[in-house]
Amino acid sequence: MQQTAPIEDEWKGNELLIKVAELSSDDSLYLYHQLRHEDEIRLVTIKPGKWTDPITCELSCHSLDVEDETEYWTLSYAWGSPRATENIILEGRQWPVTVNLANALLFLRDRKQPVRIWIDALCIDQSNLKERGGQVQMMKDIYSGGKQVVVYLGDGKNHRPKRLAEQWTSSKGPYPS
């Protein structure tokens, strides 16, 4: 089955042009190896890098079982528009993610050490409805098993309606003086 996903966007005048690539189910099959056990999850490892380096990540499978003492963080974030995407490198391939997720990955990346984290959009095979349903049922355990929960709400640049932003800048603000 073919599905489209925006992989690159650019501004031309006042118009946002989105370039679309075809992603097939083969892409997900290549990237997402089937989870072997019901209590298994994938974790993303964000490779170290400078702010200007490409975001590079790898996936690994881990059990939520007590015996697997793998430390990880979890990310809770506003997905943002699925039409506004940037590419990261995931398992050696270009992979489209929302701009919010790309920004969160930039802020989470360490210059010297890898960061292991659970991120729903990357750790769950979104094209596999059965897996998606099972992983959603496990979210309480996934979040409670992490060392810490990181919350990222975005940078706010592209998420405020223009009229509301103009009202805020042209008035004394929403608070009484």
Image (cartoon, grey):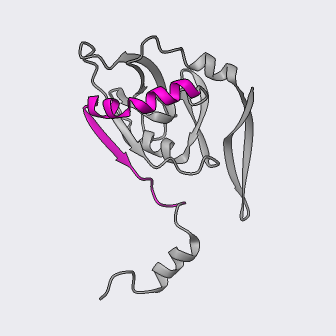
Q: Position of residue 42 (x, y in %)?
A: 43, 22
Q: Is residue 89 above or below residue 14?
A: above
Viewed as shown, does residue 20 lie left or right of 98?
A: right
- Nearest the camera: 78 or 130? 130
Viewed as shown, does residue 33 lie left or right of 72?
A: right
- Nearest the camera: 16 or 139? 139
Confirm whether the magenta stretch covers residue 152: yes
Q: Please identify the quadrant where the C terminus is shown.
A: bottom left
Figure quadrant of residue 90: top right
Q: Please identify the quadrant where the N terminus is shown.
A: top right
Give the residue at x 74% y 63%: 13
Give the residue at x 45% y 28%: 135
The magenta stretch spans which residues? 129-158
Q: Position of residue 68 (x, y in %)?
A: 28, 14
- Nearest the camera: 67 or 151? 67
Give the residue at x 43% y 18%: 60
Figure quadrant of residue 47: top left
Q: Position of residue 99 (x, y in %)?
A: 54, 47
Q: Position of residue 8 (x, y in %)?
A: 67, 43
Viewed as shown, does residue 114 lie left or right of 3?
A: left
Viewed as shown, does residue 166 lie left or right of 144?
A: right
